Image (tube, helix red, strand yellow):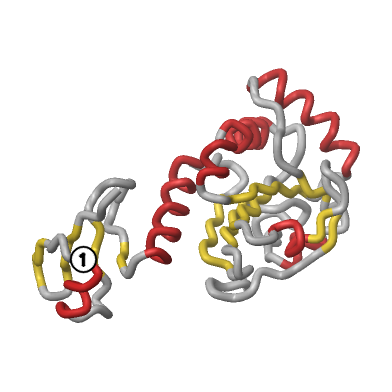
Amino acid sequence: MSLQLGQTAPDFDQQSTEGLIRFHEWLGNSWGLLFSHPKNFTPVCTTELAEVARLKPEWEKRHVKAIGLSVDPLESHGAWAEDIAETQGHALNFPLLADADKHVANLYGMIHPDSDPTVTVRAVFLIDPAKRVRLILIYPPSAGRNFAEIVRAIDSVQLSDWAKVATPVNWEPGKPVIISPALTDEQAKEQFPQGWQELRPYLRMVELPD
């Protein structure tokens, strides 16, 4: 992947199921979840897009806009959307980019030629309101994504922006977090007056208020 964490997410203009998307303008001050699926009218993708639609309340809580992409043409998206609604019980409620010219896919490195040169892999990009790439996940075409994990990862990234903390293995919201080693104990006392558990000088666990 040529695109790396912390870099500015490439801007683009591309057609979608909700009209022309000017990406940075469309994002505005929101977070963005840009994800690719290999091909329309395929079984795994059908289940994934319905799950993203089902999770719309969770995206909204986190000020995240979801947007999908495949290299299929726009008319194919419309016909497939009917299948998604009928088979999965969730109609699409976010735009799907029709990236038939592979412009966006190439900008974001979504096509891995040694996997399949004709379709995108299952790529996920979390983009913050400053348009920086904050998370990248890549799955092979055969493996459906766990969107509960993606929600959890968004929570972790957003929490680290709010407080100087990191999240430990298998962390979930409400569980203790790790105070950044960049903070001295004196600085930590100011930010975390509730105190913490010091397992090692570099491993200080703290519970955050709701």
Indicate the quadrant where residue 188 lies: bottom left
Left or right for 186, reference 57: left
Where does residue 135 sit, x and y in percent of width and height?
A: 51, 62
Left or right for 125, reference 85: left
Q: Amino acid at mark 1?
A: Phe
Residue found 57% across the figure and 43% down from its top:
60
Residue found 60% across the figure and 64% down from its top:
129
Taking 75 as reference, is 13 above or below it?
A: below
Closer to us: 192 or 204? 192
Where does residue 128 sit, x and y in percent of width and height?
A: 57, 63
Indicate the quadrant where residue 178 lies: bottom left
Left or right for 196, reference 125: left
Residue found 16% across the figure and 80% down from its top:
186
Taking 119 as reference, is 182 above or below it?
A: below
In the rendered image, the residue lying farthest to the right is: 75
Where does residue 103 sit, x and y in percent of width and height?
A: 82, 63
Label 1 residue SS: loop
Taking 163 as reference, is 176 above or below it?
A: above
Where does residue 56 sit, x and y in percent of width and height?
A: 59, 37
Taking 191 as reference, is 102 above or below it?
A: above
Residue found 68% across the figure and 59% down from its top:
110
Q: Which residue is mark 1?
A: 192
Indicate the quadrant where residue 116 lies: bottom right
